[in-house]
Image (cartoon, rainbow, N blue to C red):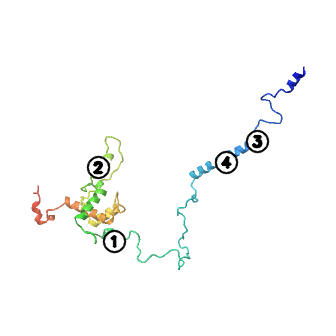
């Protein structure tokens, strides 16, 4: 072998895939363990969030923005140095009444007094055409849907409910429907205006009360209009003033 060939052979580079002395292709274990630890740490927040959303906690929720929700306050019967008598619970102001109570006007609120229903409007209300017109308007809004415009219990809600319950052309939508009471039923006609007011206020049987929706004066107006409807369908000739009876049509 010549000197030139021996020099070439001595300077031949290592093959591309040959391992170099002192170097390893494996990733250091510290990086592997560090990566696994990082993945575990990244899984912690989603796991905590999922648990918080799924499990009820007895602790108070985190409240970053207070919005005056948590304020300094006294507990019941706790002493308070800010007041001269040292009590945090203050006595009621003289003359204070409970919300919703009316002193001296129980008949206006209850529809009766001394265990008897009122047969006329309570003190402070006047029966006139404007009052009855108001009652007619409120009756049309709140009552006619079930009881009908004339009060015979044939309102649109009753008609629709009856059609659904007795649907012969398809599946029955419901099993029971209680027909609204006709205000011309003898048991209702005999009721004083105060008792009708109480029914409008508190409800009866399946009918809910309307105290929360209708003011007191409007409930009395409705009760008065109900008595007017009853009289219109059950009037007698004696109810017509003598000077107007000649205008009545002849009896059939």
Left or right of 150 on screen, residue 242: left
Question: Does the CB distance between marks 3 and 1 fall below 8 Å?
Answer: no
Q: Is residue 247 left or right of residue 10?
A: left
**Mark positioned earlier in the residue sequence (2 or 1):** 1
Label 1 residue SS? helix
- Per the image, label 2 sits on a secondary structure element best described as helix
Residue at (69% x, 46% y) in the render: 38
Q: Which residue is mark 3?
A: 29
Q: CA distance from mark 3 to mark 2?
A: 81 Å
* Res 49 seen here: yes
Mark 3 in CB contact with mark 2 (< 8 angstroms): no
The crowd level at tag 1 (other Cα within 10 Å; few <14, some 14-19, many 20+) is: some
Residue that mark 2 sits on: 159
Please state the horizontal and vertical placement of residue 18, each as a whole percent of the image: 80, 30
Residue placed at 90% from the left, 22% from the top? Answer: 3
Residue 11 sits above or below residue 211 on the image: above
Farthest-out residue, bottom: 84
Residue 214, numbered circle = none
Reading the image, the residue beneath label 4 is: 41
Give the spatial CA distance, label 2 vs label 4.
66 Å
The residue under the point 27% across, 62% down is: 134
- Residue carrying label 1: 106
Q: Position of residue 239 (x, y in %)?
A: 16, 64
Q: Label 4 neighbourhood size at 10 Å, few (<14), some (14-19), many (20+)?
A: few
Q: Nearer the viewer, mark 3 or mark 2?
A: 3
Residue nearest the viewer, comparing 104 with 194:
104
User: Looking at the image, is mark 2 or mark 4 earlier in the sequence?
Assistant: 4
Which numbered disc, 3 or 2, marks the residue that appears first in the sequence? 3
Q: Nearer the viewer, residue 45 or 60?
A: 45
The label nearer to you, 3 versus 1, is 3
> Looking at the picture, how far across and down is residue 91, in whole percent?
47, 76
Circles 4 and 3, Cβ within 8 Å, touching? The answer is no
């Amino acid at each position: 072998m010549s000197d030139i060939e021996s020099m070439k052979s001595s300077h031949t580079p290592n093959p591309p895939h040959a391992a170099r002395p002192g170097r390893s292709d494996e990733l250091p274990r510290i990086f592997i363990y560090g990566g696994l630890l990082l993945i575990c740490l990244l899984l912690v927040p989603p796991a905590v969030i999922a648990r918080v959303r799924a499990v009820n906690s007895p602790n108070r929720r985190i409240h970053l923005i207070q919005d005056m929700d948590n304020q300094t306050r006294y507990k019941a019967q706790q002493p308070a140095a800010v007041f001269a008598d040292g009590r945090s619970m203050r006595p009621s102001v003289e003359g204070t009444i409970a919300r919703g109570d009316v002193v001296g006007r129980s008949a206006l609120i209850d529809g009766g007094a001394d265990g008897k229903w009122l047969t006329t409007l309570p003190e402070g209300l006047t029966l006139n055409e404007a009052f009855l017109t108001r009652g007619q308007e409120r009756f049309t809004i709140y009552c006619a849907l079930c009881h009908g415009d004339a009060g015979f219990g044939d309102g649109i809600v009753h008609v629709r409910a009856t059609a659904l319950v007795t649907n012969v052309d398809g599946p029955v939508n419901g099993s029971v429907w209680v027909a609204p009471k006709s205000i011309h039923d003898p048991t209702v006609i005999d009721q004083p205006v105060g008792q009708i007011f109480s029914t409008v206020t508190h409800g009866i049987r399946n009918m809910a009360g309307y105290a929360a929706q209708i003011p007191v004066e409007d409930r009395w107006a409705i009760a008065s209009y109900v008595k007017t409807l009853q009289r219109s369908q059950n009037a007698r000739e004696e109810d017509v003033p003598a000077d107007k009876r000649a205008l009545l049509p002849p009896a059939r």
